[in-house]
Image (cartoon, grey):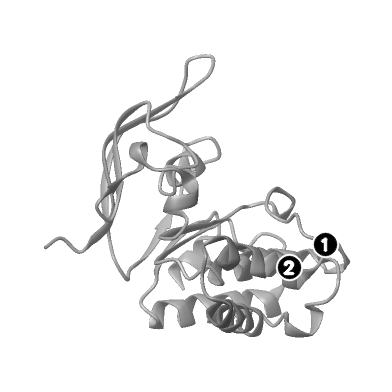
Amino acid sequence: MSNFIIQTSNLHHVYPGNVHAIKGISLAIEAGTKVAIIGENGSGKTTLVKHFNGLLKPTEGVVKVKEYDTRMHEVAFLARYVGYVFQNPSDQIFSARVLSEVEFGPKNLGYPASKVDELVEYALELTKLTKYKDIHPYELLYAQRRLLCIASIIAMDPEVIILDEPTGGLDYKNLQLLEHIIHELTVQGKTLIVISHDIDFVAE
């Protein structure tokens, strides 16, 4: 049985205006691995990974998450398996409290209250945001808002976590925390897909 958790075959995506963002991408990502996707701005990195959880659908070709063809399933279904952390926190954060932001995903997936509490507590603790749980997200520093976006995906307990340019705006201390988070998730057997221009971070 295949251990590939994400597979694409001859994937093309064309945006309105006949803009060909990606052409003929075929790849397979094994469960439990760490993968970095690097390249120039405009090379299609974010377009590619947005196919992995159904935010974008193929113009041509096939994308599978586990055994599921993403063309046949909505984002809400695929989010149980693949979590995507946006590059810009403003594109992701919408709640009035840090706690509400992190709770939303697991609650929406229908997990029992006890599991929601457990996942949320772990996500806040791992990202060092527990003491900020009752404040508005925009009272956080920018780096903390980035970590909040990561926490909200961790709390959904997906098998795959995609981090889009996660090092942007992080100081040395928070960069170390990010590396610790990635290590902990890897130990749990999560599949990590990172888009980054930070070659030193990728190498580490």
Residue in the foreground of this view, choosing between 115 and 39: 115
- The answer to whether 131 appears left or right of 29 in the picture is right
Q: Position of residue 65 (x, y in %)?
A: 32, 52
Q: Position of residue 124 (x, y in %)?
A: 66, 80
Q: Position of residue 114 (x, y in %)?
A: 56, 83
Report the quarter where the N terminus lies: bottom left
Q: Which mark is residue 96?
A: 1
Q: Position of residue 10 (x, y in %)?
A: 25, 33
The residue that appears at 62% across and 63% down in the rendered structure is 167
Q: Which mark is residue 73?
A: none
Task: Name the residue tied to disc 2.
Answer: 100
State the SS at label 2.
Answer: helix
Kindly check if marks 2 and 1 are in contact, taking CB atoms under 8 A apart as contact: yes
**Residue 11 versus residue 64 in the image, above or below:** above
**Residue 83 versus residue 76 in the image, above or below:** below
Find the distance from the CA under tag 2 to the CA under tag 1. 7 Å
Please identify the residue farthest to the top as the structure is shown: 17
Residue in the foreground of this view, choosing between 172 and 149: 149
**Residue 156 versus residue 79 in the image, above or below:** below
Q: Amino acid at mark 2?
A: Ser
Q: Quarter-wise, where is residue 122 in the image? A: bottom right
Q: Amino acid at mark 1?
A: Ala
- The answer to whether 135 appears left or right of 158 in the picture is right
